[in-house]
Image: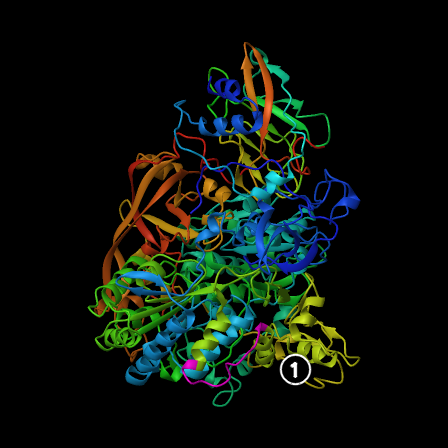
Amino acid sequence: MANQEALDRQGGHPCLMSRRSFLLTSAAATATYTVMVTMSPGSAAAQQVPAAVATYPRKLIGRLSELRVDEPVDFSYPDEEVYSDSMLVKMGVPAGGGIGPDSDVVAFNYTCTHQGGPMQGTYQGADKALGPCPLHLSTYDLTRHGILISGQAYQSLPQVLLELDGDDIYAVGIFGLIFGRYDNLQA
Amino acid sequence: MATPYYVPETSVPLPPPDADVITTACDYCIVACGYKVYRWPVAGGKNGGPLADQNAFGVDFPVDPLGPWIAPNQHNVVLHKGEPHHIVIIPDKDTKHVNIDGDSSIRGGAIAKKAYNPQSPTRDRLKQPLLRMYGVLMPVPWDFALDIAAEVSKHVIAKHGANAYGVKTYSYQYMENTYAITKYALRHINTANFTFHDTPSDVTSTPGFRDAGFDNFGPSYEDWRDAETLLICGTDPYETKTILFTQWIMRGIENGQKAIFMVPRRTAGVAYAEKNGGLWLDVLPGTDLLVVNAIARIIVENGWEDSDWIQKWVNNKWESSSGFGQGTRNTPWQWRTTWGKFQTAGFDDWKKWLLAQPEFELDKASELSGVDPQKIRTAAEWMAKPRDGGARPKTSIMIEKGFYWSNNTGNTQAISALGIIVGAGGRPGQVIARAGGHQRGGLRGGKYPRNKSPEKLPGRRRRAIDTDRYMVAGHTRLAHVIGNTWIQSMCGSQGLAKRFDELVVANPHQIRSFDKQDIIDTLKARADSGGMVVINQEIYLVDPIGNRYADIVFPAATWGEETFTRANGERRIRLYQKFYDAPGEAKPDWWIIAQLGKRMGFDGFDWKDSNDVLEEGSRFSRGSRKDFHMVKVAAHREGKTLHQKLAEFGTNGIQGPVMMLADGSLEGTKRLHDVNRKLPDAGPAGQNMFNKKLTHFNSQTGKCNIQKSPWSLFSDYWEWMRPKGDELWCTSGRINERWQSGFDDRRRPYIVQRWPENWVELHPDDAKARGIENGDYVMLFSDRIPSQKDTILGVEGDDFQFGSLMKNGHIELSKASITAVAIVTPAIKKGVAYMDFLHTSQPANALAGRVVDWISGNYNYKMGVGKVKKIGVSPYKDTFRSMSFARRDIA
């Protein structure tokens, strides 16, 4: 699995390496891209990282054999604090960042990245989408890393990085800032 | 350019409690949400913290929903007074108007990324004046470029006349700039070869509104909320002017408003309305007039019209003709109506005409428009059928470009009459107006010299020059293009580009010298030889107008880099404050114009700052919908500048026209045509000006003209354009996530990831018939793009009608083709393909005819036609990084 390889390579910078590898290997075909990515140059963000580098917890959130197509399972990540509500879903179609034999299992944070609307219960099986957000109607494409379909969000829906160990599904990281927080690991 | 390999940030810096806070409004759509800029120095590393007393918002993080959260796309680093500063720009959570709960769209929400930062994709901002020498644009000093521009300009005007100096400018990019530009072009150069970014001729966008007496922007946003039935034509405000929908119309729908959308495309706002009891009239391009008049017909057949309103506010036979010879003879309304095509003798006369037109019968209108007859009947009932007990529904009508750029004159005449009979006008929740596209930043510093235009319709006075046709004919010897693409935003774009190639690039007189006089002489020789010189003022190098055609490029400073003033779609005037340094040597457009004006020998271009320009221009706003002159009077009484006074209004601003009350306080105008408004008994004291439209309609009597809207003036063009064989309508419009040409969005990695290039929505049946799937590359093409090639003097009444132009050999057919990524969705009507309206490399307008609406002079941009075929597979089809093919109308 490409994502497992990414994790194995992550070394001392778990978030960074896995994020990069994740994004570069998220094609329908699993061939590894050789394109180099320049990490976002807004160096100001880097200055804000706390001195003690926190890392994402590895958390068991479900079992592959127990997932049913288009039936989301809720979990909390990366902590139990506000805005940690997330969903794990097997969509039945391949997806960016999808794990499992069909690359169709993905996980996302539930909070709309526009103005913090709760999107629990808005999974749309027919379109593999989350939303519309009850506040301002944003919708997100869960096959494409939570990219905005239509709406007003300032970024994609934060995607939870998954790892498959046998039948066990682990959450191991997040891409994108969770609404309401200034740092994903500071709640 | 931004890369689609966008990696999101997972943390942001917080502004410290002592960060500078500067108010502004969004640079983009008509709504102009209020924003706050938080600014603090990078040096010292003094960022804020997550506790309320540690940050500028005074709140604990994580914040509540709707709270002052900062997405990483809302942070940037800029230079302020030469020193690096953090900026965070988020919607103003305290504003009392417009975006009232601190809401924002994706466009404005990410506006911090607009600011120049050499470490971001904004790094290619124009920073120095450029001069094309040896075929390459080279940086040169300001004086060098300005001297050359002015010398060549003086020569062109002296030798070839003022009309040889063509000016194609934005109409809206702040009043300080538009005042300077129009003063220069219209008052001083006095050229009739002048128009704005969105029209080939300087003419009214909504002729029907003009004739009926409706201002384009009369209502307040609360009126759209308070309507009980709202007909929205040619737009989904959710997609294009988001906050007008999410903060106002959505609130109305939640309160039971029946929203009716007349558009060929079902987007999120339409889906939301339908889910909540609304209606979608899925009209085919160009047939809106038929549906509108079918609705009107049902209303009058049932006697559902608002008789009291009509009795009081509609001109009768005598009033319709009042002022002849003296009053209305010199108005566009009179020129349009002298041929008897539109004018009526009042409501009964109009009704008689309406009922006599067979194409407005329900079945016929339904057949041509493709709208189910039951839906048309329902719309008529919702708009006008009195309830049990006799109370009328409060009905409002909103229109925008999908509607008025399809059959410009006909549609706007028809909708005005419908508005009049349902009592929409100047009462709370009962209004008729445009929704708006860009903001309202025009201020006229000169009058258009119409008598110098060669355009003359039969029996009428002259109409403004068609600047495209004038350029194509070779009359424009110097094109001065300010802040717009010209070519891609006009119809038949590829034909226009071809002409630019011939007149500019293929001309033998190209600069091959370092000597200033040589350079000037070369450009003069270009103009004298029948070629064209191009001067371009821009913030980025635009292809092709700057990149391929411009001889001289002046770098402009823009939003946030200078203090500017502008109004929004409810005439709310706000100050857009400077908060960081413009890149390099870039200067605001008013300054560039002033330098040219002085070198041309014109007086009155000695402004010292942008406030100076606006203070000079304020008196020219008098009587207009954004009259702010009394703000200046108040400012000077208080020893302040106009800008200082406007800054005090913050993001709330003040709605024009502004009047001063007896106690010296200022009062804004909630709505125009406000028939219930009581103006001060003392009258327009001091410098106050009471325009008729404050309390009446903008017509010869103050009452509405109810006008005819004949289908026959347009039907020959519609029939000719109408798809033949396997052609489809190829229409276009806005997409929520991009603004205008994408000049900023193309430099935002997140937006580039979402919309990496042009796309086309196709109905599943149309796609299947052509073997097209989601993500396929398609070619949209046509070998019958019509363009009117000759400027003729009209003699007979129908000389300018499309059928006559064709018969008399004034129409030329050409080819066009553009590529796009296919999106297959049932959200678009069968038989219609829909694209973004302005991709600079793949312009949808290439497929629209370069033939103006013959009554008004506007293009009917939305009437493109072409064939569609698959040419391959795009990189987005089988990868997950970019684009989405999910439907946009999930509700």
Q: Position of residue B697 (x, y in %)?
A: 60, 75
Left or right, A143 with respect to B813, comes to: right
Quarter residue B628 falls in: bottom right
Is residue B606 covered in magenta?
A: yes
Quarter residue A25 falls in: top left
**Label 1 lies in what chain?**
B
Left or right, A169 with respect to B292, comes to: right
Please give the residue where the numbered disc 1 appears in the rendered image: B689
Q: Position of residue B322 (x, y in %)?
A: 53, 85
Q: Residue furthest left?
A: B508
Is residue B884 covered in magenta?
A: no
Q: Identify the amino acid type marked 1.
A: Met
Q: Which residues are magenta?
A: B599-610
The chief SS type of the magenta part is: loop
Left or right, B526 with respect to B316, comes to: left
The colouring scheme, among rainbow, by chain, secondary structure or one colour, is rainbow
Which quadrant is home to the C terminus of chain B? top right
Q: Is residue B248 above or below residue B342?
A: above
Q: Residue furthest front?
A: B44
B446 vs B478, nearest the viewer: B478
Q: Position of residue A16 (x, y in %)?
A: 55, 29
